[in-house]
Amino acid sequence: MVQVYVEPISRRHYAPYFSVAFLYRPFCIIASLIIAFSIALTSGGLWVKTHTYVTQPSVRFKYDMLLVFETTNGPGTERVWSTFDSVNYLMGNKLAPVDISASEQDVNSDGKVDLIDIKAVVRGVGDVNGVKALLAFDYSLGGRVDLVMNSMAYAAHSSPLAGSGLYVDGYLRLDQRDAIPAGFTRHDYNYSVFPFAEHGEAKGDTRHASTLRLPVVLNQYNFRNESTYLDAKTPVWESGNSPDFTFQARVRIPTSQQVLYRPTTLEIWKFAWVQILAIYIIFWWIFTKFEYVVFHHRIVDTRVVSDLQAKSHRF
């Protein structure tokens, strides 16, 4: 003989509405949810206040910059050049003649710039022993957060020896004081990083160009919640006496920039529900085992109907 079919046999328990037996299962469901919520809440991490994700920012060079060349003749003899006519006019005889060239490269052909090469050659500046450079960029993020802003890279180096060139190579990294809110486009800093550029450019207008002092510019920039900095750990100083000086900067755009953001309410509930559900399943399984004990041993009053009882058939 072989088994050809299995028919389950059950014992069915019946009870009136709102009796103890009737309310046992709703009680187990509610108790499991309360316990699961309590454990998830007290163990921490239930409500995710901040989260991170990785993306490659979109960066373009704005061709706005400020260069300061310090000479060996001492303080007050530095030479300055910028892309702003009002600033250059204010400098007078301190203005340095500079030739600027820049190029952008998309190395992996993904539609985003990966490298930005900037070269500045100053003529007849004399012996230079220090350089400070402020470079402006258009910076935007996509994905979990939408961010559009103007950002800056600051490079500086000095040497006791006169030099003929400085080469810096580093990543343009994002710096955040607080998480970026998700769910809308943030453009709070979509204006020039140079304070004097906000008032327009008119040659001879020096009313606001006087704020070009580097401490003023950097202080205002560093108060921002989102900013960028040039992570150049190995600057190369080329020593030598030369009437010309060459400043070169290679700005690399990180392909895996970590961004800290504040998730939306829907995303917070999504992560919270996953934790609660995982704990709820465990306690619901435990309560179902107790349910067998409660009904099998008749701890609560029910009317039991068994499939083994003979049923009367009417023909």
Image (cartoon, rainbow, N blue to C red):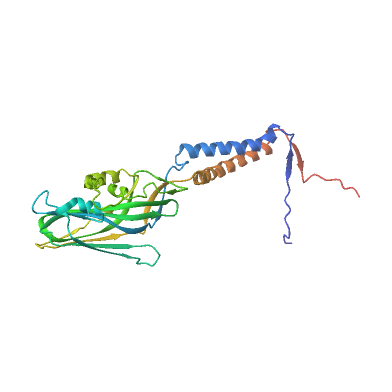
Nearer the observer, 59 or 20: 59
Image position, residue 103 (x, y; %): 29, 65
Q: Is residue 1 left or right of residue 126?
A: right
| Residue located at (55% from left, 36% from top) | 34
Q: Is residue 198 above or below residue 304?
A: below
Can residue 253 be seen at all in this image of the molecule?
A: no
Q: Is residue 234 above or below residue 182?
A: below
| Residue located at (26% from left, 58% from top) | 170
Displayed quadrant of residue 312:
top right
Image position, residue 140 (x, y; %): 38, 54
Displayed quadrant of residue 125:
bottom left
Nearer the observer, 184 or 210: 210
Nearer the observer, 313 or 85: 85
| Residue located at (68% from left, 38% from top) | 295
Nearer the observer, 302 or 4: 302
Can residue 211 be seen at all in this image of the molecule?
A: yes
Image position, residue 18 (x, y; %): 71, 32
Image position, residue 190 (x, y; %): 37, 50
Which image quarter holds the N terminus? bottom right
Q: Is residue 14 above or below residue 183?
A: above
